[in-house]
Image (tube, grey):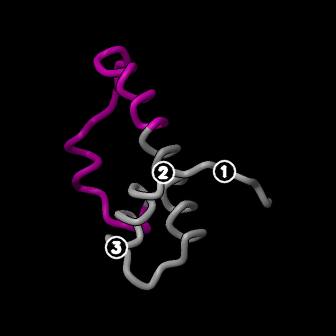
Amino acid sequence: MRTTLNIDDEALQAALEAAPGKTKTAVINEALRGFARRTRLRGLLAFGGKVRWKGDLDDLRRRRPGRG
């Protein structure tokens, strides 16, 4: 999608220097994905200590991959 944005020139230049060979579009897309990921992860922190897990950790450790 095409969008017109007013971007901080210094911030964009710093990002481009940190990611040599990437285009402005690639750097901005990567930044947007990173922002969305960090925001989702922060949301998960709200569950810290509020979810009770019932299971047998020792049993899970004994299982072999592919053997369910």
Mark 3 vs mark 2: give the one in front.
2
Say which residue label 2 marks: 8
Is 7 displayed left or right of 9 in the figure? Answer: right
Check if residue 45 falls in the magenta segment. Answer: yes
Residue 68 image point, x, y percent: 45, 58
**Amino acid at the residue labelled 1:** Leu
Question: Residue sitting at 52 percent across and 44 percent down?
Answer: 36
How many other residues sit within 10 Å of disc 3, few (<14), some (14-19) or many (≥20)? few
Q: In which quarter of the view is residue 50 placed?
A: top left
- Marks 1,3: beta carbons within 8 A: no
Whether 9 is drawn above or below 45: the answer is below
How many other residues sit within 10 Å of disc 2, few (<14), some (14-19) or many (≥20)? few
Mark 3 vs mark 2: which is more N-terminal? 2
Q: Quadrant of the N terminus?
A: bottom right
Query: The magenta stretch spans which residues?
Result: 39-67
Residue 5 is tagged as 1
Nearer the observer, 55 or 14: 14
Asked which secondary structure carries label 1, the reply is loop
Question: Residue sitting at 76 percent across and 54 percent down?
Answer: 3
Label 3 to label 2: alpha-carbon separation: 14 Å
Say which residue label 3 marks: 17
Residue 66 image point, x, y percent: 43, 68
**Amino acid at the residue labelled 2:** Asp
